[in-house]
Image (cartoon, helix red, strand yellow):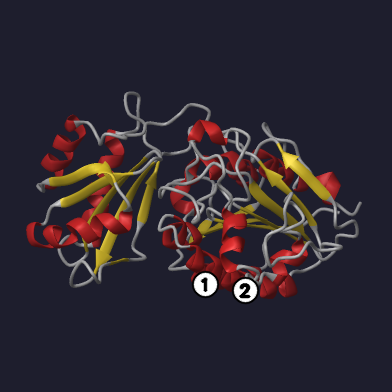
Amino acid sequence: MSYKRVFVIVMDSVGTGAAHDADKFDDLGSDTLGHVGEFYKGDLKLPNLGKMGISNLRDTPIEGVPVADPAIGDYGKMEEISAGKDSMDGHWEMMGLPVTKPLSTFPNGFPQEIVDKLEKFSGRKVIVNKPYSGTEVIHDYGERQMKTGELILYTSGDSVMQIAAHEDVIPVKELYKICEYARTLVNGPEYTVGRIIARPYVGPDKDHFTRTANRHDFSLKPIGKTDMDRLREAGYDVIGVGKINDIFSGQGIDRGYHNESNMDGMDHVDEVMKQDFTGFCFTNLVDFDAMYGHRRNPKGFGQALMDFDKRLGTVLKEMKPDDLLMITADHGNDPGFRGTDHTRENVPLLVYSPSMNKSNQSLGLRKTFSDLGATILENFNVDSVRGTSFYKEISND
């Protein structure tokens, strides 16, 4: 059978072990799910992800999460062919548009010509301008920024430019305007940056600064047609939840929902599940990444997984026979690994529908994230240009 509604939930940064090319990224030994499980020493309780096969797809089960025998759905892993390991790379590849040319990174900070233009446009001095942890940079420079009104400019190992400012000093709308201008400076050909990220924060002092949900990503516009575009052109609904709208610059999306948190995102998923539509709902839950992965906090990461798992139980109960759910990730961000950057890992692939009568099948290791988009397109009888559908493997025809 074909499915009327397809839901994809991306657990941002929830990798499941080093990819075949992890050595090229200095990420050998990374394993987000494995290391979170080890930290919890058997106390990581994921009953819903567990029965979907989250441990079945691994050579070594996650500690505390037994192999399901049988799993209620199908399970496997996907490996990335894109040149980077950023959220944009992963999501674009899922939608049939892998990023094959490495985007610009700035291990020594951004060129002075870009800094000069930012300062001229904003009328504000730029400080820092080097790779930095997002929480550490506001701890170290936030009080100065509050006094001077400067812009905190920093980056990471990914192709990102991040600009932080206290909301009481630089209003969010002004920060967005500055980031929109910064976007125009790095669209190529000399410098091509994946994402410009506005990073507002609040708080009275360095020991109490917190980043707010007013973060906004100004992504590079897709350089070609995506599978979401193909679905819309064929007359199907495409709904984005979380930073999906940012990642694709609104392209290929009928309507979107901004998430304040993972739980807010799941509220939006619950809301969309009550709607009558035919098409695709694409959800990103970013807290795993932003709150815990980059901060190398395995305890918080594991708790976020358990909180999500509880909400997943509601989704599974509310699914209709002609609904299809796929759960995956866009990259790793191992809280038990060195550094603070994303990690090059394979990602989980969990597939379920109440109408599946051939569950507990291994989908193996998919050779590109684009297999996910190709599967969605085949379900709706739309031609794909990249990836191999596993739809026939999960269909109950």
Give the x, y percent position of residue 203: 22, 71
Query: In 3D space, how far apart are the residues under numbered discs 1 and 2 (Cα atoms)?
Result: 8 Å
Give the x, y percent position of residue 16: 63, 50
Q: Residues within 10 Å of mark 1 (few under 14, many from 20)?
A: some
Report the residue at 18% width, 72% height from top: 204
Report the residue at 56% width, 64% height from top: 39
Of mark 1 and mark 2, the one earlier in the sequence is: 1
Above or below, 334 against 156 in this view is below
Q: Are marks 1 and 2 in contact (CB under 8 Å)?
A: yes
Give the x, y percent position of residue 213: 37, 65
**Left of 247 or right of it: where is 67?**
right
**Left of 149 or right of it: where is 235?**
right
Report the residue at 48% width, 68% height from top: 300
User: Which residue position holds label 2?
Assistant: 311
Q: Which mark is residue 168?
A: none
**SS label for mark 2:** helix
Amino acid type of the residue that numbered disc 1 sits on in the rendered structure? Met
Amino acid type of the residue that numbered disc 2 sits on in the rendered structure? Arg
Q: Quadrant of the N terminus?
A: bottom right
Q: Which mark is residue 263?
A: 1
